[in-house]
Image (tube, grey):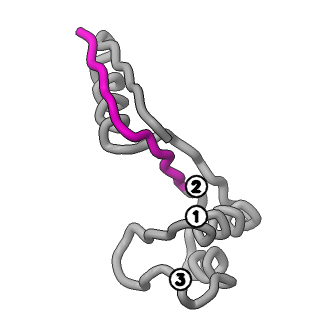
Amino acid sequence: MTIYGIGRAIVDYYVEGRFDDGFLEQAFGQLPENQLPSPTGRPIHVEGAAFSFVLNQISTLDGYKILKETGGTCVNILKTIETIAPQVDCFFTGTV
């Protein structure tokens, strides 16, 4: 069987490390007030220049590593299918 997905590919970022109560303050501490994420709910949504700033801040923290993975609903579904059913060929075409 072959499954072919079409969509918009995005990149998901994950932070690997032990989070403590000071992690968000360290990562977001220097952002201008109007770019700070809402303190309620997770995941935290950050856009544009603030997103780049936060990634840079996290990359400078000791003990944390940023993992970068392809993402998006279609890609995630295809990756899951390929993982649980390796006999299925999955392909994806998309834009970034």
Q: Amino acid at mark 2?
A: Glu
Q: Residues within 10 Å of mark 3 (few under 14, many from 20)?
A: some
Which residue carries the number 2 mark?
16
- Mark in the foreground, 3 or 1: 3
- Please tell me whether the stretch drawn in magenta is mainly helix, strand or loop: strand
- Give the SS element for disc 2: strand
Q: Determine the residue positioned at 71% across, 64% down.
A: 56
Per the image, the residue denoted by label 3 is 36
Residue at 55% x, 81% y is 35
Q: Which residues are magenta?
A: 1-14
User: Which of the two marks, 1 or 2, is nearer to us in this view?
Assistant: 2
Give how far apart the Cα atoms at labels 3 and 2 are.
21 Å
Q: Residue furthest bottom?
A: 33
User: Which quadrant of the figure has residue 81?
Assistant: top left
Distance from disc 1 to disc 2, alpha carbons, whole Å, reads: 7 Å
x then y, percent, for residue 2: 27, 12
The reply to whether the magenta stretch includes residue 12 is yes
Residue corresponding to mark 1: 18
Up-down: is 9 above or below 36?
above
Percent across and percent down for residue 96 are: 50, 41
Q: Identify the residue at horizontal 66%, vertical 60% (top origin).
A: 64
Secondary element under disc 1, as helix, strand or loop, is loop
Q: Quadrant of residue 88?
A: top left
